[in-house]
Image (tube, helix red, strand yellow):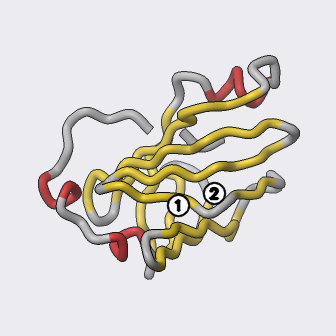
Amino acid sequence: MLCVAFTGLNAAAQESSDSVWNGEWIAEGTLFRIGVSVEDGVMTVVQIESLGQIWSSQEGTIEGNIANVEVQYLGATGVIQAELIDENTAILHAASCAPDFMVVCTLSRDRQAIFKKVGD
């Protein structure tokens, strides 16, 4: 599952434009890949390679270098928060996940994933 918490921010990431998010992103160490596009401050995330996981997402919001996207997976609903560290790196974590008793929520708690931009 996708997961973001990072304290040291790159100055370039703080001043980035929404278009930096556009492109294909891969979860480091996996084949899990998503496509991201941003238009008028609204983020859209699509599955490219989900490793057999069936999930869906709503339109996301961006504030500075932080993006939030609501996702649904196996009866659980959560918000994935992504923090852009530089133009090619984002750290993700589950900012929320409900219902709490769902295994996916338990497994994603206090976890994070690094995503690398692999193409525009």
Observer-nearest of 58 and 12: 58
Looking at the picture, how far across and down is residue 70, in whole percent?
64, 49
**From the image, which quarter does the N terminus lie in?**
top right
**From the image, which quarter does the C terminus lie in?**
bottom left
Do residues under tags 2 and 1 come within 8 Å of each other at their CB atoms? Answer: yes
The residue lying furthest to the right in this view is 75
The Cα atoms of the two marked residues, 2 and 1, are separated by: 6 Å
Q: Residue at x 58, y 52 (%)?
A: 69
Q: Residue at x 53, y 70 (%)?
A: 36
Question: Three-letter amino acid code at disc 1?
Answer: Ile
Q: Indicate which disc, 2 or 1, sits on the residue closer to the N terminus.
A: 1
Q: How many marks?
A: 2
Q: Residue at x 75, y 30 (%)?
A: 104
Mark 2 falls on what kind of element?
A: loop
Residue at numbered disc 1:
26
Looking at the picture, how far across and down is residue 27, in whole percent?
53, 53
Q: Residues within 10 Å of mark 1 (few under 14, many from 20)?
A: many
Residue at numbered disc 2:
32
